Image (tube, rainbow, N blue to C red):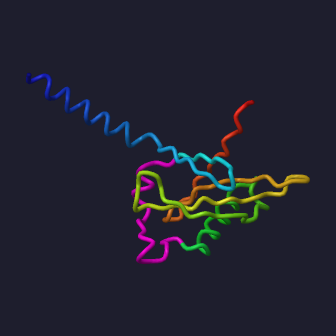
């Protein structure tokens, strides 16, 4: 019995560490496009909470655009990107945490290449991926 208790404690501790080191998959839709981002729990918890009934969002649109511009300046492929669209969304399974799903576009010959981002309320910008269409 004395060996079981330390083993159980170690198992519980290990499972807590593993749970906090793997990112959470956030799946969203914007304009019928499925977008996936991977966000760490600690980043969500460090981001301010928000109650839409009582206050403006902690990260307002003007500051969101500034954060995206600063991110684009650090990544040469986004140097000529422009702001295309944004949606405000609640983070799944985190009722008091919200994020923006933002879209930038860059000129790409005759069409525009779209780039997707999850932006937390503390201004952290997380690149997201457009999920490919299923094969028919």
Q: Main secondary structure of the magenta part?
A: loop
The one of 17 and 132 positioned closer to us in this rendering: 132
Residue at point 70% right, 55% down?
A: 75
Residue at point 49% right, 65% down?
A: 122
Per the image, is 121 magenta? no
Q: Residue 73 at x, y = what percent?
A: 70, 62
The one of 93 and 114 positioned closer to us in this rendering: 93
Q: Residue furthest front?
A: 136
Q: Residue 17 at x, y = what percent?
A: 34, 39
Q: Residue 55 at x, y = what percent?
A: 44, 77
Is 25 above or below relative to 61? above
- Quadrant of image for the C terminus: top right
Residue at point 61% right, 63% down?
A: 87
- Quadrant of image for the N terminus: top left
Q: Residue 67 at x, y = what percent?
A: 61, 66
Residue at point 73% right, 64% down?
A: 84
Q: Residue furthest right?
A: 110
Per the image, is 45 magenta? yes
- Give the magenta part as a residue range: 39-59
Q: How many marks?
A: 0
């Amino acid at each position: 019995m004395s060996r079981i208790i330390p083993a159980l404690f170690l198992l519980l501790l290990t499972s807590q560490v593993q749970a906090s080191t793997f990112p959470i998959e956030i799946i969203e839709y914007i304009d019928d496009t499925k977008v996936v981002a991977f966000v760490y729990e600690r980043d969500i918890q460090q981001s301010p909470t928000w109650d839409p009934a009582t206050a403006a969002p902690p990260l307002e649109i003007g500051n969101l655009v500034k954060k995206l511009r600063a991110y684009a300046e650090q990544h040469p492929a986004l140097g000529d990107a422009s702001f295309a669209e944004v949606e405000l969304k609640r983070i799944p399974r985190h009722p008091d945490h919200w994020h923006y799903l933002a879209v930038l576009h860059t000129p790409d010959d005759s069409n525009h290449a779209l780039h997707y981002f999850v932006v937390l309320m503390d201004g952290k910008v997380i690149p997201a991926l457009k999920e490919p269409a299923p094969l028919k």
